[in-house]
Image (cartoon, helix red, strand yellow):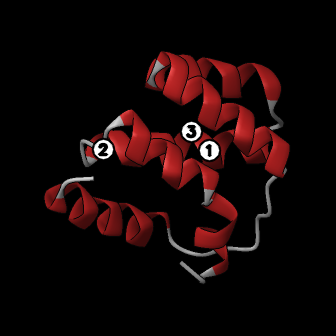
Amino acid sequence: MKTKEMENMDKVVEEIGTGPLCMNEPLLEEVTKTLLDKGYAAAEVFVSQRTGADEQDEIVRALAISQKYDLSPEAGAKVVQNLNVIKSGKW
């Protein structure tokens, strides 16, 4: 990852913030795979079709924030993959 992208990833993590929501790890893995294989739009569609309201809101929010800071799909996938760690405040 480029230095600028790493700086932006820190901004993404800060904006996502912490919270009590714990997401299903296999779901996060599937979203990560979809993001890497097909991009942000396909990952958002996947999430909307496969998740409940709370998980959907949080994952789509993380994807949107990642796009806002111009993270590559690879960097965005790292954010999604580690969403539980980020939400726990241990990132």
Image location (x, y in percent) of residue 4: 15, 59
| Residue at the image point whose x is 33% and y is 39% from the top | 67
Callout in the foreground (3, 2): 2
Is label 2 in contact with label 1 (beta carbons under 8 Å)?
no
- Amino acid on which disc 2 is placed: Leu
Mark number displayed over residue 59 = 1
**Helix, strand or loop under label 1:** helix
| Residue at the image point whose x is 65% and y is 71% from the top | 85
Q: Which residue is mark 2?
A: 71
Q: Which residue is mark 3?
A: 60
**Helix, strand or loop under label 2:** loop
Q: CA distance from mark 3 to mark 2?
A: 14 Å
**Helix, strand or loop under label 3:** helix
Of pointers 3 and 2, the one earlier in the residue sequence: 3
Mark number displayed over residue 34 = none
| Residue at the image point whose x is 40% and y is 66% from the top | 15
